[in-house]
Amino acid sequence: MIRLLLAEDQAMMRSALALLLNLEDDMEVVAEVGDAESLLAAASRSRPDVALIDIELPGRSGLDVAAELVTVLPGCVIVIVTTFARPGYVQRAMAAGARGFVAKDGPVEALVDAIRQVVAGATVIDPELARHALRSGASPLTERERAVLVEAEHGGSTSDIAGRLHLSRSTVRNYLSGAIGKTATRTRTEAARVARRNGWL
């Protein structure tokens, strides 16, 4: 029996998915969570074989939590299930340790098949997303530039961002300048918007 954890913020979608997956003879949903903060604790309690994680979870990105889950529960296989078909997300999901990336708008049979494949040791990526990811290339942002842009999205001055990240103001300015140059934009707001659209944040 394949034990599953579902991390999906929309309760109706989560319940429907759990119902459909529990109909499979070889699958059982052992935990359901609606936000990122509950995910690690639920995984530690239920010890799932596979965690199905949405990217846009309240609190934190599902991609960031996925990277932590790999460390906390190395035997759990991660499949990202999302409506956000951004190439950068595929690259970040694989870097976080996910073995599957499936679009929500596909048939449930495709998800069931992907679960069985990743449990068997395969890596499964939605073919259209894989093509886009290969065409777009990797994110040009460093991890620090990405972190600074995420903070810039929340607003505040350079000093505010420096305080939140425990960096100097000049270091934050350098990272922002680098991110603006790499995204071919003029302001931190535009840079964050472009990076978000490409799935780099």
Image: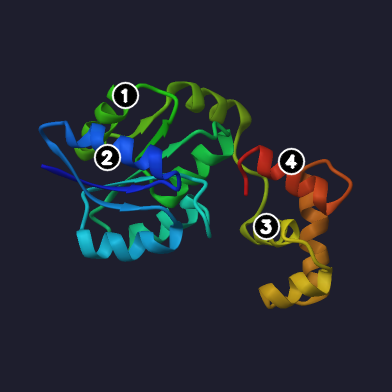
Q: Where is residue 85? Give x, y as percent.
A: 54, 31
Residue 193, by quadrant, is: top right
Q: Residues within 10 Å of mark 2 (few under 14, many from 20)?
A: many
- CA distance separating discs 3 and 1: 33 Å
Colouring convention used in this rendered image of the protein: rainbow
Dot 2 amino acid type? Ala
What residue is disc 3 on? 150
Tag 4: Cα neighbours inside 10 Å, few (<14), some, or many (≥20)? some
* Quadrant (top left/top right/bottom left/bottom right) for the N terminus: top left
Mark 4: amino acid: Val
In this figure, which residue is indicated by the disc labeled 1?
110
Which residue is depicted at the point 77% across and 77% down?
Answer: 168
Mark 1 touching mark 2, by CB under 8 A? Answer: no
Secondary structure beneath dot 1 equals helix
* Residue 181 appears anywhere in the view: no
User: Circle 4 sits in a helix, a strand or a loop, which is it?
Assistant: helix
Residue 66 or residue 18, whichever sits in front: 18
Disc 3 residue type (three-letter): Val
